[in-house]
Image (tube, grey):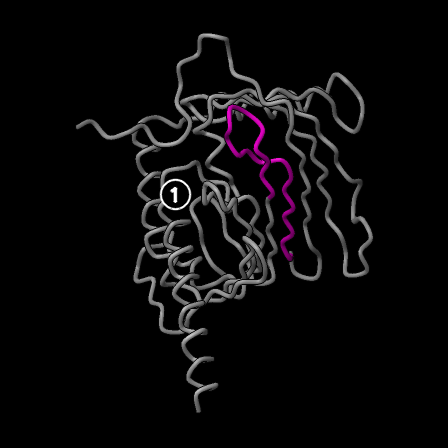
């Protein structure tokens, strides 16, 4: 009986420690750029120019390319208006083709990410991390590594951007010193709408961050796979060479502190 009671106390203590850790993670991430679902809106909030090398494919049921794979190397600049993209090379050839250059030019002209959009992203982020601890059951897998599965009793209500909390399961790792998430991967369990995209059942998403610039964790690798009927679209991107616009740029990383 004594052994059983001790086991119960130890289990309760472990659960309490996990709850405290998750709460600190949620509090920390609520004020940092968002990289945890496509599109990664956190890129709109970082004061850097960077590069991406991406491979985009559409595969059939046998894993064969339905059309030629597309590899794009881009130079990307995060500004108040969003992300401005410059196509550096297309399938290893530079400059990019005229149609590709025109497509990115049209996209750059349509980018609008002003104060209202930034405020909306911030509100969605705050609400997501507010609900994150109660939306999942968490299991410690090792030092700084956790598995999460949705709680059946969690109700996201009518907020469209919270529906994903009831529709994914996966794992994440964190920096035990700062409580920042350094990697996250998940699978979508049912069709769900998120701002800017529909994620169908079976979609897989993962992103890895690295402590690369001025102590900030920034994306280094992304993998996205989404079913398209019997086919599936895949995207893999590597991010590198983060640098500030100029040496005297005075933009802040993450949320600007509220005025007192």
Q: Residue at x 52, y 48 (%)?
A: 174
Q: Is residue 168 above or below residue 205?
A: below
Residue pushed farthest front? 2
Residue for point 36% across, 43% down: 30
- Look at the image and tell me in which quarter the N terminus lies: bottom left
Q: Residues within 10 Å of mark 1 (few under 14, many from 20)?
A: some
234 shown above or below 70: below
- The span shown in magenta is 208-227
Name which residue lies at 50% across and 9% down. Answer: 246
Residue 171, by quadrant, is bottom right
Callout 1: SS: helix
How far across and down, in percent of the image, does residue 236 sit? 69, 42
Q: Position of residue 207 (x, y in %)?
A: 59, 44
Q: Main secondary structure of the magenta part?
A: strand
Query: Quadrant location of residue 17?
Result: bottom left
Q: Is residue 193 left or right of residue 182?
A: left
What residue is disc 1 on?
Answer: 28
How many labels, in total? Answer: 1
Q: Is residue 35 magenta?
A: no
Q: Position of residue 112 (x, y in %)?
A: 41, 26
Which residue is nearer to you in this view: 55 or 249?
A: 249
| Residue 45 position (above or below residue 149) | above
Q: Quadrant of the C terminus?
A: top left
Foreground: 140 or 223?
140
């Amino acid at each position: 009986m004594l052994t059983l009671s001790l086991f119960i106390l130890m289990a309760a203590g472990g659960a309490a420690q996990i709850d405290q850790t998750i709460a600190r993670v949620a509090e920390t991430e609520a004020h940092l750029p968002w990289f945890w679902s496509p599109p990664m809106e956190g890129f709109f909030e970082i004061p850097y120019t960077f590069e991406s090398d991406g491979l985009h494919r559409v595969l059939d049921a046998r894993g064969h390319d339905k059309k030629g794979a597309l590899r794009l190397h881009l130079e990307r600049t995060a500004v108040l208006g969003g992300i401005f993209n410059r196509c550096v090379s297309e399938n290893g050839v530079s400059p990019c083709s005229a149609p590709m250059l025109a497509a990115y030019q049209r996209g750059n002209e349509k980018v609008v990410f002003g104060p209202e959009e930034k405020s909306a992203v911030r509100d969605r982020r705050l609400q997501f991390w507010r609900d994150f601890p109660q939306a999942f059951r968490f299991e410690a897998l090792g030092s700084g590594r956790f598995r999460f599965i949705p709680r059946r009793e969690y109700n996201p209500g009518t907020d469209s951007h919270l529906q994903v909390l009831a529709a994914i399961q996966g794992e994440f790792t964190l920096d035990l010193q700062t409580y920042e998430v350094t990697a996250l991967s998940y699978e979508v369990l049912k069709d769900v709408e998120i701002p800017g995209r529909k994620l169908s059942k079976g979609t897989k998403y993962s992103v890895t961050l690295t402590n690369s610039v001025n102590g900030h964790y920034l994306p280094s690798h992304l993998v996205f796979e989404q079913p398209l009927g019997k086919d599936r679209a895949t995207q893999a991107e590597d991010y590198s060479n983060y640098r500030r616009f100029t040496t005297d740029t005075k933009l802040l990383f993450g949320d600007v502190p509220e005025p007192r």
